[in-house]
């Protein structure tokens, strides 16, 4: 991207044209202002009870990216891309301040009062704090719970990076324990996915196609064909 930044691409164009980029040009930077915009977009993602359990480790240091590559199945793009976002989810953030702070923030924005917030606090604690097998407890798998949320924020980050003219590569090919060790990520935190951001080197890989609507979307009942205009 040059000094005169391109206009943001429309979402429909980004969705259609995004590819998982195989190789990045290490010398083509991601501008700090853009990075701020990209991350801020992710932080605007929705979450259950607005608990925002996502955490992002932004890896830019070349030495650190080299080590991260080793923890990510030696994928060259981890070392090539100037920015690699390690998207994580904290299974315990909600009981270590996030719930209280989210409610306080809501109050500052004029959303809800003490009585409503007391109910929310009881509900969240009952839901996320329930033990498997406990009476009335619905015992969510907190790994699934953070995954659900982190991938929304992750995807929002990806769309914003693409809208600003960058290329991206999402990755699940990494060893979680090695990534956690390298980045000193606490035990309560899961590493959900990696996102490389930069400018591609060479061609993107070709479009691999997508299954049609009829195969994946149903009308009112599982398996019932959904008919929509072409
Ligand atoms: C969550 C997720 C994890 C992925 N992990 C990897 C990965 O570790 N390595 C890789 O080369 N591609 C990875 N991909 C890229 C996919 O292979 C790619 O998105 C898919 O083939 C469709 O291609 P397209 O995104 O270019 O349309 C991943 C994609 C997603 C969404």
Image: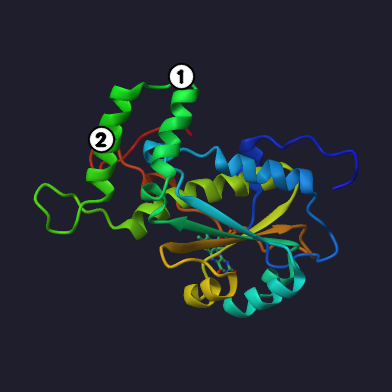
Farthest-out residue, left = 135
Q: Is residue 37 visible?
A: yes
> Within the image, what quadrant is residue 156 found in?
top right
Q: Secondary structure at mark 2?
A: loop
Residue 73 locus on image (x, y percent): 58, 79
Farthest-out residue, top = 110
In the picture provided, is 134 more to the left or to the right than 107? Answer: left
Residue at horizontal 23 percent and vertical 40 percent from the top: 221
Residue at horizontal 75 percent and vertical 65 percent from the top: 24
Residue at which label 1 appears? 110
In the picture provided, is 172 more to the left or to the right than 8? Answer: left
Using the image as rendered, state which of residue 213 and residue 144 is in the foreground. Answer: 144
Residue 84 locus on image (x, y percent): 66, 62
Using the image as rendered, state which of residue 67 and residue 72 is in the foreground. Answer: 67
Q: How many other residues sit within 10 Å of disc 1, few (<14), some (14-19) or many (≥20)? A: few
Q: Nearer the viewer, mark 1 or mark 2?
A: 1
User: Between disc 1 and disc 2, whose residue precedes?
Assistant: 1
> Within the image, what quadrant is residue 188 found in?
bottom left
In the picture provided, is 192 more to the left or to the right than 71? Answer: left
Q: Secondary structure at mark 1?
A: loop
Q: Which mark is residue 135?
A: none
3D distance between C-alphas at marks 1 and 2: 38 Å
Residue at horizontal 45 percent and vertical 53 percent from the top: 211
Looking at the image, residue 102 lies above or below residue 209: above
Residue at which label 2 appears? 220
Q: Ligand 1 lies in which image quarter?
A: bottom right
Residue at horizontal 25 percent and vertical 41 percent from the top: 224
Looking at the image, residue 39 lies above or below residue 80: above
Q: Check whether the beta carbons of the residues at disc 1 and disc 2 lie within 8 A of each other.
A: no
């Amino acid at each position: 991207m040059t000094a005169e930044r391109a206009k943001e691409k429309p979402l429909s164009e980004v969705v259609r044209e995004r590819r998982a980029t195989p190789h990045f040009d290490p010398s083509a930077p991601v501008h700090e202002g853009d990075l701020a915009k990209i991350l801020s977009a992710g932080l605007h993602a929705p979450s259950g009870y607005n608990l925002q359990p996502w955490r992002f480790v932004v890896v830019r240091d070349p030495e650190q990216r080299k080590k991260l590559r080793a923890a990510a199945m030696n994928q060259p793009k981890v070392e090539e891309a100037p920015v690699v976002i390690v998207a994580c989810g904290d299974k315990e953030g909600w009981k270590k301040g996030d719930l209280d702070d989210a409610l306080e923030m809501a109050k500052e924005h004029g959303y809800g009062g003490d009585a409503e917030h007391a109910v929310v606090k009881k509900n969240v604690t009952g839901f996320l704090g329930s033990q498997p097998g406990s009476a009335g407890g619905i015992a969510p798998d907190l790994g699934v719970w953070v995954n659900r949320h982190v991938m929304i924020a992750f995807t929002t980050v990806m769309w914003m990076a693409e809208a600003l003219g960058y290329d991206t590569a999402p990755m699940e090919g990494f060893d979680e324990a090695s990534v956690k060790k390298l980045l000193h990520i606490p035990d309560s935190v899961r590493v959900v996915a990696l996102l490389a951001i930069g400018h591609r080197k060479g061609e993107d890989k070709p479009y691999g196609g997508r299954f049609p609507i009829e195969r994946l979307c149903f009308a009112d009942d599982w398996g019932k064909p959904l008919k929509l205009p072409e």
